[in-house]
Amino acid sequence: MDNYNTINEVLVKLFNDIMEIEQKAIITEEFKDISNNDMHIIEAIGKKESKNMSTVAKSLSVTVGTLTIAINNLVKKGYVNRERSEEDRRVVLISLSQKGKHAYDHHEKFHDEMIRATLAGMNKEQTEVLVKALQNLTEFFKGYGKKDVGKTDN
């Protein structure tokens, strides 16, 4: 099989498997009360300072309304803290609770193991080529997301 077909096969399989694999790896017995989507919201909130809802919604490419529903559930489950800004009471700030920070660390560990496995046995030049290829793929997705899906170039 030539490189083009190999890359196509690997990418298609990877995209089909990645969410399922990540779900199995990070939603363990300890975190069985949340979904993979919840874990990505936890990741977007991060462990540093509180963030406003708009910032997190934008980083996840969802509406504030959609995020609010998910945050309500994460607050009830004890993963997220929600408070009003002292400077502007209209602004809702969210941050991770200790439980949320623990989930964040668990998710980060999975990503670290994934990256280490990907780079295993690669030299600096090979790693640089992989980084460039992944940057190209990211740019493709950014551009493709702006296209009219289904529209032909006739």
Image (cartoon, rainbow, N blue to C red):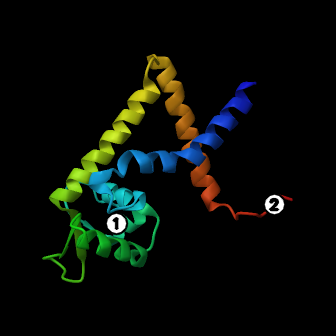
Instruction: From the top left corner, tell me how far across and down residue 116 is, in percent.
Output: 39, 29
Picture layout, residue 124 above or below residue 109: above
- The x, y position of residue 143, in whole percent, is 61, 53
Would residue 102 be found to the left or right of residue 19 on screen? left
Secondary structure beneath disc 2? loop
In this view of the protein, which residue sits in the foreground, 22 or 141? Answer: 22
Identify which residue is drawn at 65% across, 43% down: 12
Q: Amino acid at mark 2?
A: Thr
Q: Is residue 25 above or below residue 78?
A: above
Image point (24%, 71%), residue name: 75
Quarter of the rendering occupied by the C terminus: bottom right
Residue 152's mark?
2
What secondary structure is found at the residue carrying circle 1? helix
- The amino acid type, in three-letter code, at marker 1 is Thr
Mark 1, other Cα within 10 Å: few <14 / some 14–19 / many ≥20:
some
Specify the quadrant that holds the N terminus. top right
Which quadrant of the view contains residue 8? top right
Q: Residue furthest left?
A: 86
Q: Earlier in the sequence, mark 2 or mark 1?
A: 1
Residue 120 x, y percent position in the rendering = 43, 22
| Quarter holding residue 88 | bottom left
Count neighbours of disc 2 (C-alpha within 10 A) and say few if under 14, some if 14 to 19, many if 20 or more: few
Q: Specify the label residue 55 is tagged with.
A: 1
Q: Position of residue 100 (x, y in %)?
A: 23, 58
